[in-house]
Image (cartoon, rainbow, N blue to C red):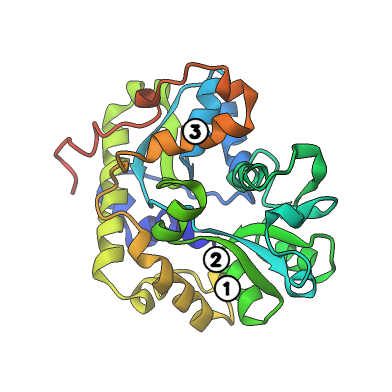
Amino acid sequence: MRLIYLPAILTKRLGYFEQQGLDVDVVTEPAGVNAEDELIAGAVQGVVGFYDHTIDLQSKGTDVESLVQFASAPGEVELVSSARAADIKSPADFKGQSIGVTGLGSSTDFLTRYLTQKFGLQRDDYRLLPVDAGKTFIDAMRHRRIVAGMTTDPTASELLSSDQAKVLIDLRTEASTREALGGIYPAGCLYMRAAWVDAHPDEARKLTHAFVKTLRYIHTHSAEQIVDQLPRSYYEKRKALYVAAFKAFQPTFSVDGRMPDSGPRTVLAILSAIDPSVQATDVDLSKTYTTAFLDTPGGK
C-alpha cells in the first residue's frame, strides 16, 4: 500500500467507518486513473486518490469534489536508475528515453509531463510507460525497461535503500514541493461525484468524519504504532523500511482534512500547462472541493 493512500485502509482497520454506522469496502487499484474510471462507471461511490483528478474530470464534463484532504504534498519522487545517474541529471535529460509512471492519465503522468515541460522537453521527446507501483515498478527499473520514473513510498525507499536508484526531484515534503512546482500541491484526498454527495449528505458527512478521525490518529501516534495496525502483506519483510518511510512523510498529513488555501490554484496552473482541454475550460475551483462536511457536527 502506497503511504499517500494509507488513511483508507487505516480508517477501515481502526473501525472508524463502523463507528459511523457505515459498511465500507476498500478496493485497491494499481493507479489513480483506474479508480477514476471505476467511479465514472458507478462501480464505486468514492475514490481515495489525487485531488488533481477533480479538476481533470470537471474539464471533461464530470463534476466530482474532494470531501477531505489528506496531505499538502504529492508524496511522489522522480527517481533515476543508478546505472544512468551519471548521464541523467534532470528531466531535461529524458529525451529519447522511456520514463515510468503508475498509469497513463494518472497523477504521476500529470506531474511527469509538467516537470519535463518545465525542463524544456516536448511530449514527443520521450516515452511514458505505465508500470504501476511496487514490484512492477522496481522490476521495470531493474531490467532497464525504464531509465527513470515517478513513484511513491515504500517503492521509492526500497529502490533508494538498495542503491538501485537516485533522487532527481523529491515531492515528498511541502518545502521540496514548493521548490519544484511553485506552490503547495494538495494530493491524496477522498473525492466523490457531486451528484452522489448531494443525494447522500448523511453518508458523506459520516465518511468525512471517519477520515478526519484517522488523520488525528496519525498525528497522535508513532509511526511504529500506525504500521502495526496494517495488514502484514503491506510491508511483508520490509517493516523497518516501511516505518522509516512513513515517519518521514507523517508530518505532511493534514491534521484536519482542510484544503490548503493556495493549493487548488497551483494544481489548476499545472494541469492547464500540460493539458489543452483543461486550459480551454473555465474550471470552477469552488466546485472541486467542499468543507461543508468538515464544518458539520455529528462525527463520532
Tell me where residue 247 appears, x and y as whole percent: 40, 73
**Element on which disc 2 rests:** loop
Quadrant in the picture for residue 236: bottom right
Mark 2–mark 1 contact, CB under 8 Å?
Answer: yes
- Pick the front one: 218 or 199: 218
Residue at the spot x=40%, y=47% of the render?
Answer: 184
Tell me where residue 56 appears, x and y as whole percent: 55, 29
Residue at the spot x=14%, y=39% of the render?
Answer: 297
Instruction: Tell me which numbered mark, 1 or 3, is placed earlier along the sequence.
Output: 1
On residue 269, which mark appears? 3
Disc 1 designates what residue? 157
Q: CA distance from mark 2 to mark 1?
A: 6 Å
Mark 1 nearby-residue class (10 Å; few <14, some 14–19, many ≥20): some
Kindly identify the amino acid type of the residue bearing the numbered disc 3. Answer: Ala
Q: Is residue 270 visible?
A: yes
From what the image shows, is residue 119 above or below residue 90? above
Disc 2 designates what residue? 153
Kindly identify the amino acid type of the residue bearing the numbered disc 1. Answer: Ser
- Pick the front one: 210 or 270: 270
On residue 289, which mark appears? none
Kindly identify the amino acid type of the residue bearing the numbered disc 2. Answer: Asp
Quadrant in the picture for residue 22: top left
